[in-house]
Image (cartoon, rainbow, N blue to C red):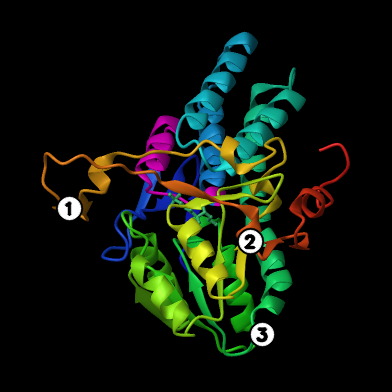
């Protein structure tokens, strides 16, 4: 299987998701600033994947800081944390990964430079490996929600490409398929970046999982005709009350699912749950360049002079969410109680 992100010998290697599905190109990055730019440009995207990329980017920056005095090294760590925190605001996994890297740095205060740098690289790799492991666990918990011969609608890409491997929402689908269930996926194309058309369709096809691409606006039509058994998506941030920030258009899918009596599931690791925010209205939502809306790929599809808006994420209120699947199990409403118990005390 392809690798979304990997650590080379002092380099970060990423599958360029801006080029899929036309070209499978791996890019090699040597400087943290290049990794940050790759996150901004969405060479790598998806909440858990950008967390891993930031961790590896910080490890790169640390490795290159030999010879700095202790205060300068501390300053560099702060600078790297700020650099990656400024890339994309919505996915909380990014900030969670930065915090983990900072913690390792702090626990090695006073150690030799080499030890610090090695510990940072080790932590980035642990983060990557844990991500895959958590996705597999999430899959095992979640697959029970997928009936035999289910027709499953998904939005955006919450697959191997959005994580270090296996995926969250697509991980649950993969786990159901591994159990021998015949699952068919309806993938929303997910305008304007087309994560559904370019990425979900590509990675499911690679695995031989039957996938049918639909326009975003066709989701309600297929639900109303009884052609969807359940919807499952990933998340960029989940507030303490179960409100879910995910790719723009997720809210519409959830409302349509409720209207049509279809379960709407969210699959995400605990690192996506932000208990510090009581509800979704406090989640920072990224607004991207309107030019992306005015283009399909490299072709302009709107008059140049027309205004456009491009919120990259929306918030689905918890009342539309049937269950949240994590590596620690399945949570159901009321989420204020069911999410909190997933975390160790005091977190
Ligand atoms: O803008 P993107 O492509 O980074 O948005 C990705 C999503 O919205 C995913 O659904 C989410 O990050 C979960 S990925 C496991």
Image x and y of residue 317, in percent: 60, 52
Which residue is painted at 20% across and 48% down in the image? 294
Residue occupying image coordinates x 52% and y 30%: 85
Q: Is residue 25 magenta?
A: no
**Magenta residues (range):** 29-48
| Residue annotated with mark 2 | 321
Q: Residues within 10 Å of mark 2 (few under 14, many from 20)?
A: many
User: Up-down: is 302 above or below 266?
Assistant: above
List the residue tagged with mark 1.
298
**Counting other residues with Cα less than 10 Å from the Cα at mark 3, is it few (<14), some (14-19), or many (20 or more)?**
few
Query: Above or below — where is 3 with respect to 203?
Result: above
**Extreme-right residue of the structure:** 345
Q: Main secondary structure of the magenta part?
A: helix
Instruction: Describe the element under mark 2 as helix, strand or loop.
Output: loop
Determine the secondary structure under disc 3: loop
Nearer the N terminus, badge 2 or badge 3? 3
């Amino acid at each position: 299987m392809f690798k979304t992100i990997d650590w080379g010998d002092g380099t970060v290697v990423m599958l360029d998701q801006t080029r899929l599905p036309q070209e499978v190109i791996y890019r090699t990055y040597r400087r943290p600033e290049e990794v940050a730019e790759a996150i901004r440009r969405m060479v790598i995207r998806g909440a858990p994947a950008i967390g891993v990329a930031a961790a590896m980017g910080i490890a790169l920056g640390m490795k290159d800081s030999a010879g700095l005095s202790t205060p300068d090294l501390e300053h560099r760590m702060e600078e790297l944390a700020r650099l990656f925190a400024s890339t994309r605001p919505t996915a909380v996994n990014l900030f969670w990964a930065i915090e983990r890297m900072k913690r390792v740095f702090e626990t090695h205060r006073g150690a030799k430079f080499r030890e610090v740098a090695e510990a940072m690289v080790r932590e980035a790799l642990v983060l990557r490996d844990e991500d895959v492991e958590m996705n597999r666990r999430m899959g095992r918990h979640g697959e029970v929600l997928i009936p035999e011969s289910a027709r499953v609608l998904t939005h955006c890409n919450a697959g191997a490409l959005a994580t270090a491997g296996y995926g969250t929402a697509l991980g649950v689908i993969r786990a159901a398929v591994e159990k021998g269930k015949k699952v068919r996926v309806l993938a929303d194309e997910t305008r304007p970046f087309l994560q559904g058309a370019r990425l979900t369709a590509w990675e499911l096809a690679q695995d031989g999982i039957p996938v049918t691409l639909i326009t975003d606006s066709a989701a309600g039509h297929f639900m109303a005709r009884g052609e969807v058994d359940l919807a499952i998506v990933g998340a960029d941030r989940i507030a303490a009350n179960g409100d879910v920030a995910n790719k723009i258009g997720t809210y519409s899918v959830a409302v349509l699912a409720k209207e049509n009596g279809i379960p709407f599931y969210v699959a995400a690791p605990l690192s996506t749950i932000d208990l510090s925010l009581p509800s979704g209205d406090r989640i920072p939502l990224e607004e991207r360049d309107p030019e992306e809306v005015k283009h399909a790929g490299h072709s302009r599809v709107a008059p140049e002079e027309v205004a456009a808006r491009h919120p990259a994420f929306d918030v689905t209120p918890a009342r539309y969410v049937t269950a949240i699947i994590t590596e620690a199990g399945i949570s159901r409403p009321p989420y204020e109680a069911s999410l909190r118990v997933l975390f160790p005390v005091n977190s």
